Image (cartoon, rainbow, N blue to C red):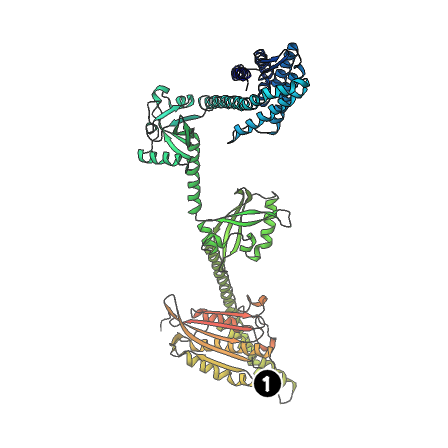
Amino acid sequence: MNRTITLAMINNAALLLALSIIYSIGYTIRFRHKKGLDLFNGLLISLVGIAIMSFSYAHAEGLVFDTRSILICVTAVVFGAIPASIAAGMTIIYRLIIGGMGTLTGCTVIIVSLVLGLFFKRFFSVKRSKFRWLKLYGFGIVVHLGMLACMLLLPRHEIREILLQISLPVLAVYPVGVALLALLLLRQIEFNEALANVSEAESRYKSLFSDNLAVMLIIDPDTGHIVDANPAAVSFYGWPISEMHKMSISQINTLPPVELKAAMKRSMEQSQNYFQFKHNRASGKPVDVEVYSGPIKMNNRELLYSIVHDISDRAAVLKALQESEERFRTLVEYAPDAIFVFSELESVYNAAGVKEREFTFTNPAGLRLLGAENLDELLGRHPLSMIHPDYHEEQWKYMADFWAGRVSPTTVERAYIRLDQKIVYADVTVVPICFNGKNGELVFARDITERKLHEQKEQEMEEQLRHQQKLEAIGTLAGGVAHEINNPLNGIMNYAQLILDASEKGTASEMYSGEIIHETERISVIVKNLLQFSRQEKQSHSYASIYDIINQTISLVNTIIKKDQITLDISPDEDLPDIKCRSQQIQQVIMNLLTNARDALNESYPGYDENKIIRLKCHEYRRDGRRWLRLTIQDYGAGIPYEFREKIFEPFFSTKPKESGTGLGLSISYGIVSEHHGKLTFESTPGNGTTFILELPVDNGWAL
């Protein structure tokens, strides 16, 4: 190998190191546009190329060799098309100025190096990889094989000699130069980019940390020492930055040291990054803060980065809200009245075009009112499902007016059906509400069941009192009328008897006088009943056996009852006590009840029927500390129509034909029982018969 050629090529390669200086210069100068930087780099690279060509090896006049191929191909790979094209153009111009027989070959080498360099940059990555140097070395071989191929453009007699002299040095040195120069520049680029990233990171850190309005602290998790604090932290805590650099986070955070250390550990392990603390300030008044904290690596140290937000106002609002909710919850939980919430259903509309509702919430009083053990038993139920059907139409109309805004919230009475099917009454007030983001109704229901039952009982007692007063008034009137009728009636009867005695048999006067006597006797019976109804006739009273009273009554009616093919089922309990009473009057009451039962059965069953039965039962019970006897007489007749039930104890009211009764039997019986301090009631179902209930105290309080 020609030593002169080799030394010249090595000197040329050394000049290529100027490229790294060019890149450093271009990197330090800030250009507004990238094209300005490319133009600047292209001009500097052109100067290097001209310098290289100035120190070339001259084989003959006009035939020179240098490392311009390395310069141009590496420039294309590292700097890109614009700087490389500028450098290629300038070196071609300079080569044309040199002139000589190698001018065409020299210019072609420059063009081939540029094209191959741009092709390599376009299709082969030069990013960091394990074999990047090998890829660049191969690229250098390809470029310089192209360079040797360009030697074919020389005069024919020079080609062989030139190739023999330069092939070995070119292929031995130039590819290595390409690889080394490209690696040097690429690593310098990567280093500068890393410096730029660090600078940018520092700039971002300054922007995010120093210029941020949020309070930020950097803490050593091992010692708790405050490594850094931004101006916002200095302003928030009130200590100067120099003093804060000397402080520990334990001087700010009010947590005990052990708990604070554990919190920092959780934050460093990233198992928890959100906390709520109380922090001290220079003013001495702790404030509520929320802290977002996590690990950060700075200067090869693992530190704790914390962002602190003042939430004292929010904490005060939340505390007030919690206290308000607690008061509301206490009011609701311990309210004596039931409170219900019904929320609207999505996409379910009723006939009025309003979204349907479902049960959403109730308080303990509501659970008690509806007989539920927990809220799950009521959730999702329709409002009407808990209201008695008698109120459905009224409730539907009221809610339709309520949803339409035609009525304001008012108190209405409703009957609810408990889960055990019992009926409870409540005064209900409905107001609109938004619950869990849905429109609905808030319902207040006050249980008035006891009051309602008490009112019903009072009403029944008033009705009984009015009925009793009515009977007493009628009785007084009947007694007075009976006494007034008795005297003229006796006169009519006596005169009729005189006429009868004076009449001959078979004459009209005998017939008429007999009829007069018959009718006056009938009137006499009615007068006697009226006197008994008015209690003008008193009888003696004593202890009597209920068995004797029943047996004596049955002996009087047994024959006629059997004649009507009626079965008597008599089954009083054993060992019943004697009762203090007027036995004949009680016997009269039982006989009247048996007669009414007989008439009801004959009306329903003219002939024999297996249901033609009268059942008489009697047993003892205790009420209010007193002993009572309850005697029931049951028939399976047609029953008492609803419209007659309030009239059956009224005097002269009867559903029988005139010739069958006077309508005084039940009235007299009611008066007798009332005088004995007892009760006479009935239960009847139309079509299924009637049961009369006679209740008598064993001791009615009469003095013997």
Residue at image x 36%, y 67%?
A: 625
In the rendered image, residue 123, in percent from the top left (x then y), is placed at 61, 29
Mark 1 lies on residue: 500
State left or right for residue 97 relative to residue 361. Answer: right
In the rendered image, residue 192, in percent from the top left (x then y), is placed at 50, 21
> Most extreme residue toward the bottom, as rendered?
505
Residue at image x 52%, y 29%?
A: 128
Query: Residue 258: which quarter of the image?
Result: top left
| Viewer-proximal residue among 576 and 226 | 226
Q: Quadrant of the C terminus?
A: bottom left
> Most extreme residue toward the top, as rendered?
97
In the rendered image, residue 183, in percent from the top left (x then y), is placed at 52, 24
Q: Is residue 612 above or below residue 251?
A: below
Q: Quadrant of the N terminus?
A: top right
Q: Is residue 103 visible?
A: yes
Query: Residue 168: which quarter of the image?
Result: top right
| Viewer-proximal residue among 592 and 121 | 121
Give the amino acid type for the residue marked by disc 1 in the picture: Leu
| Viewer-proximal residue among 424 and 296 | 296
- SS assignment at label 1: helix
| Viewer-proximal residue among 447 and 330 | 330
Q: Is residue 667 above or below residue 61?
A: below
Residue at image x 55%, y 22%?
A: 178
